Amino acid sequence: MSGLPPPGYLSSTDLIDESGGPVIRRILPAGKDGCQVTAEDVPASAAAIEVRGLMRRFGNLVAVDRIDLGVRHGEVFAFLGPNGAGKSTTIKMLTTLLRPTEGTICLNGRDAVRDPTGARRQFGIVFQDTTVDTELTAYENMELHGVLYGIPRAEMQGRIGSLLELVRLSDRANDYVKTFSGGMVRRLEVARGLLHDPSILFLDEPTIGLDAQTRALLWQHVNEMNDRSGTTVFFSTHYIEEAEMAADRIAVIDHGRIVATGTVQELKERTRAATLEAAYLSLTGTEVREERVTGGEQLRERIRGQRR
C-alpha cells in the first residue's frame, strides 16, 4: 500500500482525526464484525467493498454525507466527481487513514473501522501524492515494501521482477527513482501497491499531471492486472473520459453525496443524455468548483495563527 503503514504498524486508535477534536462515531447495527450490511446495488455474496451510511464531518463541514455503495469482486469502479466533492476523503476512510464520523466499511468482509489491521491486508493503494523514496532505486522501493509486509525473501524477488515487467520498468529496476519521469513513478507506485498480492487496489486521482500517452499506458497496465488476477479496482477521478474508458460502473459524487451509480449507459438513460459528459453535468451542474479546505488544513491554520 503505497504510503500506508503495513498491517500491525498502526493500532485502531492511531487513525487520523483531522478535525482537531474528539471523534464521535456511530457504527450501524450489524453482525459479528459490523459487516453484515450490504449496499443496495450489490449482493453481500458478491461485494468486495461494502459501505453503508458513511459520513465524515470536519467541524461544521460535512465532507461525506451518509453514502452507500457496493463494489463487486473483480470490478473496475470509478468514483467520479468535481473538485471538493468528497472523493479523497472517502478513499481515506476506505483505506483506514481517516476515521469515519458514522457508518460501516467492509473490505472482503473485514470491518475497516473495528479491524483496520485485517482490512489493510486486503488492499493496496496509490495516493494522489508521490510516496516512493526518490533516493532509492525502483527495486529497492519494491524490496522495502515487501519487507514491511513480511513477504518471504524466497518469493519477493520473483514478485518484484514480475510486477516491474508488468509496468514496463524491468529495465530500470536498478536506476534511482529521482531519474524517473512522473509517469514512470506512477507505474512504479502501482507495482508497489500490488506487491503484497491484495485483492483490492485503490487509486486516488492516479493520472493527475500525466500526459495523454502516459495516462493510456497506465490504464493499460491496470487493465492487464485486472484481467490477469481479477483484482478489484476502485479509482477516483474528475476526468469523465477516463471513467468512461476504464470503469465497469461509475458512482457520481457531489457535495459529499452519491447522486447516481450505474454503467455509462445507465447514467445516460437516467438523465436522458447523449453522452456521459452531458449526464455528468446534468447530475452535478455547471458551476465551477474550488477545492474545499479540509479540517486538517483548518487545524494547521489555527496552529500557525497561535504561533504568530
Image: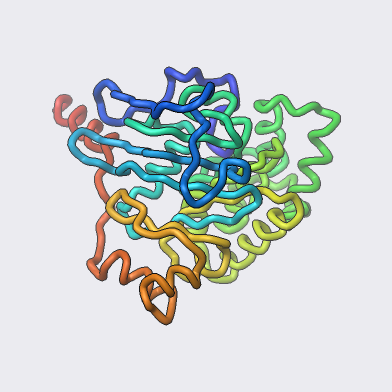
Rendering quarter of residue 282? bottom left
Query: Does 276 sit above or below residue 170?
Result: below
Is residue 305 or residue 23 the one in the foreground? 23
Rendering quarter of residue 133? top right
Count up the numbered dots.
0
Instruction: Specify whether 32 is left or right of 55.
Output: right
- Image quarter of the C terminus: top left
- Image quarter of the N terminus: top right
**x then y, percent, for residue 230:** 71, 51
**x then y, percent, for residue 286:** 26, 70
Residue at the far right: name it. 154
Colour theme: rainbow
* Residue 226 seen by the camera: yes
**x then y, percent, for residue 40:** 46, 48
Rendering quarter of residue 307? top left
Instruction: Specify whether 171 is left or right of 41.
Output: right
Query: Does 277 sit above or below residue 144?
Result: below
Query: Does 221 sit above or below residue 51?
Result: below
Is residue 9 or residue 69 the one in the foreground? 69
* Residue 134 seen by the camera: no
For the point 51% across and 63% down, which residue is it?
210
For the point 50% across and 45% down, which residue is it?
127
